[in-house]
Image: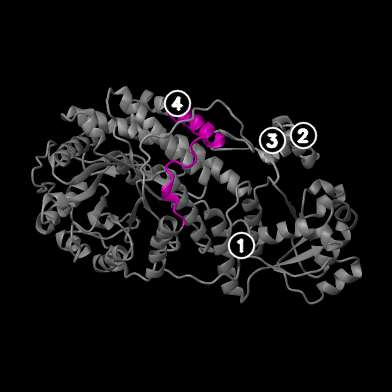
């Protein structure tokens, strides 16, 4: 038998500098920093290799053991159909229910997803044949939280056999509603007072009821960075603690009434780091409030809406799986995954079932819940957790300097900070520094069509439910005057990262409908396959992201071969692909031949500087790394439409 220790003694120990020399040798003339380093939207550098950095290594407080709560969210707006979804999901393995109220429920014409629940009758239809002891019910009620809570408590009073069966989350989040919807039904101070009174009521009830939610998905889906999400969660949580303490709740009791809702996306590393950092930061907040035995943060993690795509939605299945994995190993208490067709509209039953079953596979087949905080001690994770925590705390101090979360929203300061990050997101996406598989990278033009359910628009007609604000909730005495004017602020607009490229594809579909075929791209490939395969693959994928079909072509060794290939070809654009030497030597004659065949414009796959100055002057454009690809493709589309 080989003695491994003796064998290892024959080799000298390798250090970081040894690794770096080998990497530099492999990179050649390419820059180490440009190729292997990246940074987050909070300017936190991500290294290719981490060694002991002195980062704090400790178990994150409050990470639960055992499987997480599979909190399924029905998506159909009709209460009766949503009820069927709920019962099917619970029978199929879901362990709790998340009810999101559509804006039409409270008389709004705003767009959104959720169930249209305008009155008690509709609410009862949503939970028909559901028993309170079956599962917890979590609400996302929007601004009309009093009415939603009244409906749920009325249902509990009639259906629960005992108070111990009652379990759920009321979902009161005035600051999140103000930021996301841009308005409240009453002044913020009045809604905070009501929140505090309801939290006191929930704290005194038997059963397991949490009254308050801090929903950072509002900021995430508007494009916020990880540090901005964490700072918003901390500042909102602190604001709610103050409001509840002013109403007479002890800080420890008030903290026990809060559930934090975060978004998970396909960036596994930063999703894990974000959730770990928040648990550590919230623990620090409670300890600074002299809470002797802080209750760990309760984390409900939902799918990032901004990461989902309309085109090639099948890739969303991978995104959802990765997001669920990240949330699970980061210690989420409850996870809600969206259906893979959510960006298209109302999903069918298959998509809903798959969203649930992804979680069952992660738990039952992959066993990710069996190790608590599995990434604890990993140098990269610990270093990034420290840096993100420091960045979030710095932002929290700035929010407090604005007068707290309420003033940061009212003044528009927070919205401005998020807008700066969104601008950088769009730059990276449009320049393809960040790629979206199936949309800006490797788009599949012949993808299988996925259609959402067709919904009768009449169901979204707003209900006139504003009327009296006197709501009957047993044990609740409204501490705020009724009939006050509401409050407004600049609403955070949700984004989807794929939108710029999806707009290009939408144009191509309209063009194809008018012309009987998709727009085509002629590939002027020069030389042997090994000469042109790199730039040709780049160009084919880039133009496909705008809906252009590439006409297959082998390499053209001479003008005769090119002329023969161009005979009878119908294409809306052409691109020259080859080595810098071949392009410089032949670009002029290639452009002349392509244009003689009636194809215009003609582009280069590469930096225009590789051509002669004369050829650069006649070239229509060039596609290369670092350019605004969306802008250039929009220019091409405008050209084909005859627009200046």
What type of secondary structure mainly makes up the magenta span? Answer: helix
Residue 24 appears at what percent x and percent y? 77, 37
Q: Name the residue under label 4.
A: 394
Q: Which mark is residue 341?
A: none
- Give the number of callouts: 4
Q: Name the residue under label 1.
A: 443
How crowded is the residue under tag 3: few (<14 C-alpha within 10 Å), some, or many (20+)?
A: few
Question: Vertical placement of 139 versus 249: above or below?
Answer: below
Q: Which of marks 1 and 2 is in front?
A: 2
Q: Assess whether mark 1 and mark 4 are in contact (beta carbons under 8 angstroms).
A: no
Residue 214 appears at what percent x and percent y? 32, 40
Sequence order check: which comes first, mark 4 or mark 3? 3
Q: Mark 2 points at which residue?
A: 21
User: Which residue is nearer to you in this view: 169 or 371?
Assistant: 371
Q: Distance between the residues labelled 3 and 2?
A: 14 Å
Direction from residue 178 to residue 205 in the image, left or right: left
Residue 439 appears at what percent x and percent y? 58, 58
Q: Which mark is residue 33?
A: 3
Sequence order check: which comes first, mark 3 or mark 2? 2
Q: Is residue 293 visible?
A: yes
How crowded is the residue under tag 4: few (<14 C-alpha within 10 Å), some, or many (20+)?
A: few
Q: Which of marks 1 and 3 is in front?
A: 3
Q: What stretch is highlighted in magenta?
A: 366-393
Sequence order check: which comes first, mark 1 or mark 2? 2
- Residue at the front extreme, as displayed: 1
Sequence order check: which comes first, mark 1 or mark 3? 3
Q: Is mark 1 on a helix, strand or loop?
A: loop
Q: Is residue 415 visible?
A: no
Residue, x 69% and y 35% (percent of image)? 33
- As for residue 564 lying within the magenta part, the answer is no
Question: Vertical placement of 603 versus 562: above or below?
Answer: above
């Amino acid at each position: 038998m080989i003695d491994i220790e003796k064998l290892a003694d024959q080799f000298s120990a390798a250090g970081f500098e040894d690794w770096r020399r080998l990497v530099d040798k492999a990179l050649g003339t390419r820059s180490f920093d440009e190729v292997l380093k990246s940074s987050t939207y909070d300017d936190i550098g991500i290294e290719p290799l981490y060694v002991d950095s002195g980062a704090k290594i400790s178990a994150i407080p409050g990470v639960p053991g055992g499987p997480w709560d599979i909190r399924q969210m029905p998506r159909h707006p009709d209460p009766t159909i949503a009820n069927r979804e709920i019962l099917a999901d619970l029978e199929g393995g879901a362990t709790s229910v998340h009810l999101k109220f559509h804006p039409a429920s409270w008389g709004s014409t705003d767009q959104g997803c959720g169930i249209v629940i305008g009155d008690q009758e509709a609410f009862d239809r949503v939970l028909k044949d559901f028993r309170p002891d079956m599962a917890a019910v979590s609400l996302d009620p929007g601004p009309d939280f009093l009415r939603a809570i009244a409906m749920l408590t009325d249902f509990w009073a009639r259906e629960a056999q005992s108070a111990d069966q009652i379990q759920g989350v009321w979902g009161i989040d005035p600051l999140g509603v103000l930021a996301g919807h841009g308005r409240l039904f009453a002044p913020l101070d009045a809604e905070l007072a009501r929140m505090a009174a309801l939290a006191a009521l929930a704290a005194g009830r038997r059963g397991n009821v949490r009254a308050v939610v801090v929903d950072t998905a509002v900021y995430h889906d508007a494009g916020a960075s990880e540090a901005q999400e964490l700072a918003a969660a901390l500042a909102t949580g602190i604001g709610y603690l103050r409001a509840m303490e002013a109403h007479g709740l002890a800080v420890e009791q008030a903290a026990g009434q809060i559930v934090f809702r975060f978004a998970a996306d396909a960036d596994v590393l930063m999703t894990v780091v974000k959730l770990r950092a928040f648990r550590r930061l919230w623990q620090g907040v409670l300890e600074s409030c002299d809470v002797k035995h802080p209750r760990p943060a309760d984390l409900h993690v939902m799918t990032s809406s901004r990461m989902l795509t309309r085109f090639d939605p099948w890739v969303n299945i991978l995104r959802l799986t990765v997001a669920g994995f990240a949330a699970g190993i980061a210690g989420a208490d409850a996870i809600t995954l969206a259906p893979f067709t959510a960006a298209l509209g109302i999903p069918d039953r298959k998509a809903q079932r798959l969203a649930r079953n992804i979680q069952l596979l992660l738990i039952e087949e992959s066993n990710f819940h069996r190790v608590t905080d599995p990434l604890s001690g990993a140098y990269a994770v610990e270093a990034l957790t420290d840096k993100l925590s420091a960045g979030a705390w710095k932002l929290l101090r700035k929010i407090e300097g604005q007068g707290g979360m309420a003033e940061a929203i009212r003044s528009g300061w927070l919205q401005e900070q998020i807008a700066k990050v969104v601008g950088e997101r769009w730059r990276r996406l449009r320049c393809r520094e960040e790629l979206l598989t199936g949309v800006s990278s490797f788009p599949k033009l012949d993808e299988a069509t996925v259609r959402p359910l067709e919904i009768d628009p009449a169901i979204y007609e707003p209900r006139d439910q504003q009327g009296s604000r006197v709501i009957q909730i047993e044990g609740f005495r409204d501490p705020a005057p009724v009939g006050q004017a509401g409050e407004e602020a600049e609403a955070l607009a949700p984004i989807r990262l794929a939108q710029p490229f999806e707009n290009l594809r939408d144009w191509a579909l309209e063009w194809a409908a008018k012309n009987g075929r998709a727009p085509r791209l002629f590939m002027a490939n020069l030389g042997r396959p090994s000469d042109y395969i790199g730039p040709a693959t780049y160009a084919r994928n880039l133009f496909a992201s705008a809906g252009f079909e590439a006409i297959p072509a082998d390499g053209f060794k001479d003008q005769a071969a090119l002329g023969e290939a161009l005979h009878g070809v119908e294409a809306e654009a052409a691109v020259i692909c080859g080595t810098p030497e071949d392009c410089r030597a032949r670009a002029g004659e290639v452009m002349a031949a392509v244009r003689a065949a009636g194809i215009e414009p003609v582009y280069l796959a590469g930096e225009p500087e590789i051509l002669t100055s004369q050829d650069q002057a006649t070239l229509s454009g060039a596609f290369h790394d670092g350019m605004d690809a969306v802008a250039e493709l929009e220019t091409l589309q405008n050209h084909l439409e005859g627009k200046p």
